[in-house]
Amino acid sequence: IFAFHKQDVGPVRFAESFGGWVVTRYSEVDRVLTDHAVFSSDELRHSTGGIPHGSNPLLRGLLAMDPPRHHALRRIVSQVFTPRAVSSLEPSITSKVHSLLDSAGESFDLIAEVAYPLSVHTIAGLLGVQPSRWPDFVRWTEAITSFFGTFTADEARRTAYHRACEEMGDYFREEFERPSGIIATLMASGLAEDELLDFCALLLINGHETAKTLLVNAVLCLAARPKPADLRLAVEEVSRYLPPTGGTDRFVTRPTTLGGQELRPGQRVVAMITAANRDPEVFADPHTFDPDRTPNPHLSFGHGVHFCLGAHLARMEVRIALAALFDRSWRITDLDTRRTPVGIDVLKVTLVARSREAV
Ligand code: HEM
């Protein structure tokens, strides 16, 4: 993706093709994630490159805010993301996994028949919205994420993006008329409609896509292996080894030095989570997938004020799905690597499952 000059080796490099700094060493990636005063998430305010998409709900929401505004909003929404609220979804996630596997038959496409519907079910359950329109959720997500960050998007993509934003807005406004789940709690906490809409969009887009990819990656990593002794550790290692979010952007707010390079205000910086997770100074034998690895201080859920709000939920969802798959015994029988604009979720996996009764 990035074109570097041959002499450009080091933890922080300027990539002309991307027009910004690419950060690959753990300690520097960690600083970019945690030093929010110097590395801002507010693209609309701090970016000097390209035309920021002010209409993008992801650029207006929590993820793209800096403290103190971020702090105030996060305080409200984290009240509804308590471990208790998340754990209360466990029975519903478990029964959903089993019903999906039961109706999937012996051989099925894991992405379409399990991973997508499961992650959408989880997010919809959390938000308190009907999951029946999940094909639309997927379409909106693809239209918005494939446009996100590409200032040169063609007309067709631009149109699809604007249509997706509008349709998603209309959909949520209808849901706000009969609120339940965390939407009801957030409405009661005095969140303005715009803030609520941006937050719902962030959860829907960020949440289901990444959780789905984490499950797919877990299946890829664990194929042809015995069931790990501790699925929690295994899920952490999948997150480290194949993180659904490859990197995250920040914008320099004041002159600073990073990894021996001088960075200027307004410049874009991408903190490469994938690379940091394989830094040999932090992880022994970093290119080996070790489902028992511990400690495992990977950065796949971010670090600092933007640490993933859904981390506990996503881990739980993937762990439950893996346990159900191992219960039935499974293997990958087909892989289809068609490219989609969304990145790593290009792998189509077919599994063979045995019915639970037969085990
Ligand atoms: C951040 C939700 C799954 C990686 C966030 C934020 C939210 C969120 C709301 C913004 C937090 C903030 O700005 O304060 C969710 C939900 C998920 C989910 C609801 C699924 C149930 C995942 C997964 C991964 C992931 C599976 C990757 C393993 C991240 C990262 C950030 C983040 C890296 C921080 C990005 C940054 O600092 O720029 N998530 N997430 N998320 N999430 Fe998740």
Image (tube, rainbow, N blue to C red):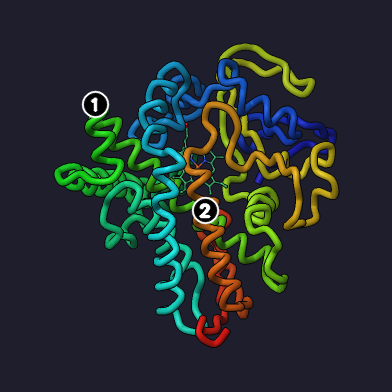
Three-letter code, disc 2: Met
Q: Position of residue 264 (x, y in %)?
A: 63, 16
Q: Quadrant of residue 56?
A: top left
Left or right: 227 in relation to 185: right
SS label for mark 2:
helix
Quadrant where the image shows the C terminus: bottom right
Q: Which residue is mark 2?
A: 316
Q: Residue at x 44, y 63 (%)?
A: 94
Confirm or deny contact between disc 2 and disc 1 (CB under 8 A): no
Q: Quick check: is the Cβ at mark 2 less than 8 Å away from ligand 1?
A: no
Front of the two marks 2 and 1: 2
Q: In the current view of this chain or complex, which residue is farthest to the left?
A: 177
* Mark closer to the chain start, 2 or 1: 1
**Along the viewing direction, whichever of 7 and 349 lies nearer the viewer:** 349
**Mark number, residue 302:** none
**Along the viewing direction, whichever of 133 and 162 lies nearer the viewer:** 133
Q: Quadrant of residue 189?
A: top left
Q: Can residue 352 be seen here?
A: yes
Where 126 falls versus 186 (above or below)?
below
**Along the viewing direction, whichever of 309 and 162 lies nearer the viewer:** 309
Marks 2/1: CA distance?
30 Å
SS label for mark 1:
loop
Q: Quick check: is the Cβ at mark 1 less than 8 Å away from ligand 1?
A: no
Left or right: 16 in relation to 183: right
Q: Position of residue 38 (x, y in %)?
A: 59, 17
Q: Position of residue 97 (x, y in %)?
A: 45, 67
Query: Crowding at label 1, few (<14), some or many (≥20) Cα neighbours within 10 Å?
Result: few
Q: Position of residue 229 (x, y in %)?
A: 71, 62
Left or right: 61 in relation to 66: left
**Mark number, residue 190:** 1
